Image (cartoon, helix red, strand yellow):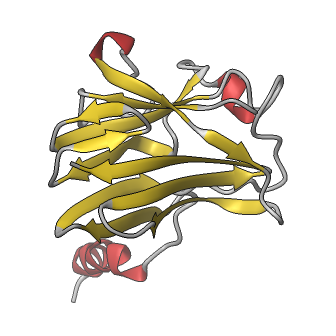
Amino acid sequence: MNMFGKYLALLALAPACGFAQVSPAAQADITVAGKKLVIRYAAPSVRGRKIFGEGGLLSRDPTYPAWRAGANSATSFHTDADLDVGGLSVPKGDYTLYCWVKDPNAWELIISKETGQWGLEYNPKMDLGRAKMTMSTPSAKVETLKYTFTSQGGNKVKLDLAWENHAGSVMIAVK
């Protein structure tokens, strides 16, 4: 094999090496009352940085105080059912999630009708609406952003979002 062929073979194999991503793809999903809810996001890590509040990493985002609630591409949310998300009526379909974090101790989950955009392209005119989140302090620092669905029985589920020293949750009910 000539040098050019070896170079092409090396290029072809590079994606298979599985280099670790700084903010790897992650997913949270649950089936509630026979309907699937799925959140897809890129999970950033703290890596010694201050994240929330004045001077924090998020305060330097161009969309601040609306945060893409993940890294890289915007966080996506799919529901097979009509939902009540913290008092907000959400028809079945596909959405983008953002989080209003101007006050690190009083978040609002933003559900946007705009989908497929890069995470730093927030358009408030596309908001379906917002739901206030219940805030808490994790028992230990959350190094990597984490979404979690927890069944509450019947048609209800709790969505938790935790990172650094902050956690927000909202109740979801399948209609």
The number of callouts visible is 0
Q: Position of residue 68 (x, y in %)?
A: 49, 35
Residue 141: name its quadrant: bottom right
Percent x, y of residue 153: 39, 70
- In-image side of 12 versus 103 (left or right): left
> Does residue 56 appear in the picture of this structure?
yes
Identify the residue at image location x=79%, y=52%: 137
Question: Farthest front residue?
Answer: 154
**Visible residue check, residue 117:** no
Residue 155 location in percent, x, y?
A: 30, 61
Tell me what residue is drawn at x 73 percent, y 62 percent: 143
Residue at figure coordinates x 54%, y 57% from the top left = 43
Q: Which residue occupies the foreground of this view, 61 or 142?
A: 142
Report the residue that reaches farthest toward the bottom: 1
User: Would residue 83 appear left or right of 43 to someone viewing this image?
Assistant: left
Q: Give the vertical position of 152 relative to 158 (above or below).
A: below
Above or below, 15 against 119 in this view is below
Quadrant showing the N terminus: bottom left
Determine whether, in the image, residue 164 is placed left or right of residue 67.
right
Q: Quadrant of residue 123?
A: top left
Q: Position of residue 156 (x, y in %)?
A: 37, 59
Q: What residue occupies the far top of the structure in this picture?
A: 125
Above or below for 29 versus 92: below
Relative depth, front residue between 158 and 4: 158
